[in-house]
């Protein structure tokens, strides 16, 4: 039996939570921090590497993500306003900022305070001025909630090993900062809950990219992948899907897969026929 299994089996939840939090803080303190430059899609960025997840994800060159290439023909244009929800350390946000240009703007929302601090250093190092980072959790209601103290943060109901943060709805963001042209959402299984707080924004001509994390993860929030279709009427949106092992988006036929996948919902223009 490994140490993690032993702790879960024999120690109180308060103790295992405290151990998790101590391990997380120690990892941040002890990680050998570096600065590296790579090509991310069509741009070169100098990125601060300050934890093991950032090293795994960002310390290498990237091809242009399939969704950004697809969105370039569906609302991600110069001058656009983009909401990047679940922005991590904002490498994607910087890529989106390059796509929308100096007349466009990206609002990046991230629940983990460590990731927000690194993101701000990334903006300063790369002289990115058209991205605003907001330290908050996207939810169905406004108030306070808890985010897991993990490098790839998510909503966490337990007090131990979580951090209290502001909770915002998509509608409140749009009310405060303007109606977005594109929403880019990757919030670790909480996407259906976030859509409950987007009633007004869903009525606007906005393109949505949503990473669906699969039924296994969504069950922790009482949801499943196919429920996403409740929010995007075929009379108002055209749905595209890309599987985790696929390289291009295609029209959705039926329900999305049960596994992790990527979806784009493009608003239909007036008079545009359904497919």
Image: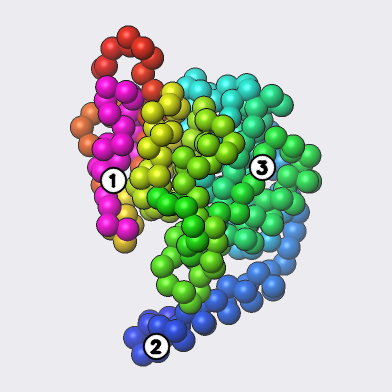
* Circles 3, 1 touching at the beta carbon (< 8 Å): no
Question: Which residue is at the far left?
Answer: 254
Work out whether residue 89 or residue 5 is closer to the camera in this orientation and state it.
89
Residue 204 visible: yes
Q: Is residue 132 left or right of residue 162?
A: right
Q: Residue at x 47, y 53 (%)?
A: 142
Which residue is the site of mark 1?
Answer: 225
Front residue of 264/233: it is: 233
Q: Quadrant of the C terminus?
A: top left
Residue corresponding to mark 2: 12
Disc nearer the start of the sequence (3/2): 2
At mark 1, the secondary structure is helix
- Asked if residue 222 lies in the magenta stretch, the reply is yes
The residue that label 3 is drawn on is 132
Residue drawn at x 26%, y 43% is 227
Q: Are marks 3 and 2 in contact (CB under 8 Å)?
A: no
235 versus 107 height, above or below? above
Q: Quadrant of the N terminus?
A: bottom left
Range covered by the magenta-colored residues: 221-246
- The answer to whether any part of residue 246 appears in the image is no
């Amino acid at each position: 039996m490994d140490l993690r299994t032993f702790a879960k089996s024999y120690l109180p939840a308060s103790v295992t939570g405290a151990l998790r939090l101590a391990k997380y803080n120690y990892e941040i303190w002890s990680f050998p921090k570096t600065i590296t430059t790579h090509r991310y899609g069509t741009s070169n960025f100098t990125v601060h590497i300050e934890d093991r997840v950032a090293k795994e994800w960002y310390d290498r060159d990237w091809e242009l993500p399939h969704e950004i290439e697809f969105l370039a023909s569906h609302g991600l244009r110069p001058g656009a306003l983009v909401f990047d929800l679940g922005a991590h350390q904002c490498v994607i946000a910087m890529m989106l900022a390059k796509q929308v240009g100096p007349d466009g703007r990206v609002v990046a929302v991230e629940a983990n305070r460590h990731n927000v601090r690194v993101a701000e250093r990334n903006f300063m190092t790369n002289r990115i001025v058209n991205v605003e980072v907001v330290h908050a959790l996207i939810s169905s209601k406004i108030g306070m909630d808890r985010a897991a103290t993990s490098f790839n943060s998510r909503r966490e109901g337990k007090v131990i090993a979580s951090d209290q943060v502001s909770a915002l709805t998509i509608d409140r963001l749009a009310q405060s900062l303007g109606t977005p042209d594109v929403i880019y959402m990757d919030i670790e299984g909480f996407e259906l809950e976030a859509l409950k707080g987007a009633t007004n924004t869903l009525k606007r001509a906005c393109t949505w990219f949503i990473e669906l994390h699969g039924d296994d993860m969504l069950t922790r929030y009482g949801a499943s992948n196919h429920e996403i279709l409740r929010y995007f009427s075929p009379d108002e949106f055209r749905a595209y899907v890309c599987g985790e092992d696929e390289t291009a988006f295609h029209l959705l036929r039926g329900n999305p897969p049960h596994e992790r996948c990527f979806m784009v919902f493009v608003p239909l223009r007036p008079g545009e026929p359904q497919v």
